[in-house]
Image (spheres, rainbow, N blue to C red):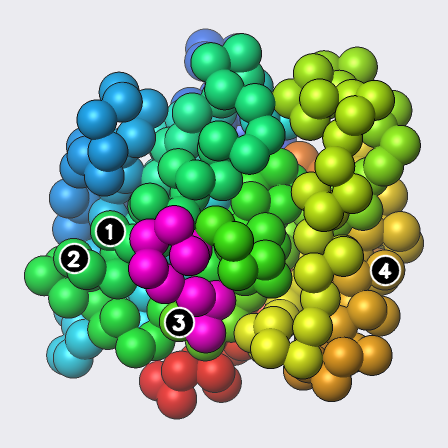
Amino acid sequence: MASAAKLAISIVAILVVVGAVAACSPVAAINALTPSSTYTLHPDIAYGPDPRQKLDVYIPRNRQKPAPIVTFFYGGNWNSGSRKDYQFVGEAMASRGMVVVIADYRLYPQVRYPEFLNDCAAAVAWTVREAVNHGGDPGQLFIMGHSAGAYNAAELALDSRWLATQGLSPSIFKGFIGLAGPYDFIPIENADTKPVFLYPDTPPDSQPINHASASSPPTLLIASNRDSLVNPVRNTGGLAKRLRAAGVPVEEVYFDRTTHTTLIGAMSRPLRALAPVLDTVASFVAARSGS
């Protein structure tokens, strides 16, 4: 009975969003239904000289002490995306007491692998330096991403090369959170992805799965069983297996009623009944930060 009620709620929520989409894009519709009362926004902060090297910070409205910080990178196949589209992600996590940093990074064709990872490392370095001035606790830092953004986050969490350019190491992270990430995708099949990663000369060390080690941070991996874009068995399941073999604590969660795209959409208030993605992320952060 309870599951039927949840399904009905989900259908109603989707219909509301679909109705809104008639007037604007899906993301705009979701953000239009996202409240701003739960956070204070510090927008358009430069972490580098390029116009794409900017970030937004979402600060919980009623925080009583420095909060855990989540730096989030969005997807878009490394050739599209904007931090402004992810207001619903910032609001969701800020409403659960986290300071959220959502960063843009340079995209193809402006850059190829690995330059966007250097951008992400610079955004994390900004977070370590400056988040205390925005209500965050740099000692409780998490890195998170969806799709291509989960790849970026995984690379920073597992491969020390990128943060080393900023004088940092992955030991700064209390945890890594990956949603529907591509962690093991050679040979590359997607035509749009091939030039980003120099295919067929894609370096094997570009794959996050090859950097799993005992020093990797505790990890939460979430995927959709219905994901037709990024194979959840090979990518999420494969990385989870490799990390566990190295002795890393891993939580591995799959949902049946989400797709590749609606997995991140389920963090929004209109689509939250699809799957408890936000609850899962918030529980992981609380457990690892002691908050």
Residue 231: x, y in percent? Answer: 86, 43
Sequence-first tag of 1 and 4? 1
Q: Upstream in the sequence, badge 3 or badge 2? A: 2
**Picture disc at residue 130:** 2
Residue 69 position in % (x across, y down): 33, 65
Q: Nearer the viewer, residue 163 or 87?
A: 163
Circles 1 and 4, Cβ within 8 Å, touching? The answer is: no
Q: Amino acid at mark 2?
A: Glu
- The residues tagged by marks 3 and 4 sit, at their Cα atoms, a distance apart of 24 Å
Locate the N terminus by quadrant.
bottom right
Marks 2 and 4, Cα distance to the nearest angstrom?
A: 35 Å
Query: On the picture, is 162 further left or further right than 216?
Result: left
Identify whether 213 is placed above or below 19. Answer: below
Say which residue label 1 marks: 126
What residue do we see at 38% from left, 50% from top?
165
The residue to which callout 3 is attached is: 172
Residue at the extreme bottom of the image, as rendered: 290
What's the residue type where badge 3 is placed? Ile
Give me the C-alpha separation between circle 3 and circle 2. Answer: 14 Å
The label on residue 238 is 4
Where, quadrant-wise, is the C terminus in this rendering? Answer: bottom left
Circle 3 residues within 10 Å: few <14, some 14–19, many ≥20: some
The disc, 1 or 3, on the residue closer to the chain's N-terminal end is 1
The residue type indicated by label 1 comes to Trp
- Tally of numbered discs: 4
Q: CA distance from mark 1 to mark 4?
A: 31 Å
Q: Are marks 2 and 1 in contact (CB under 8 Å)?
A: yes
- Under tag 1, what secondary structure? helix
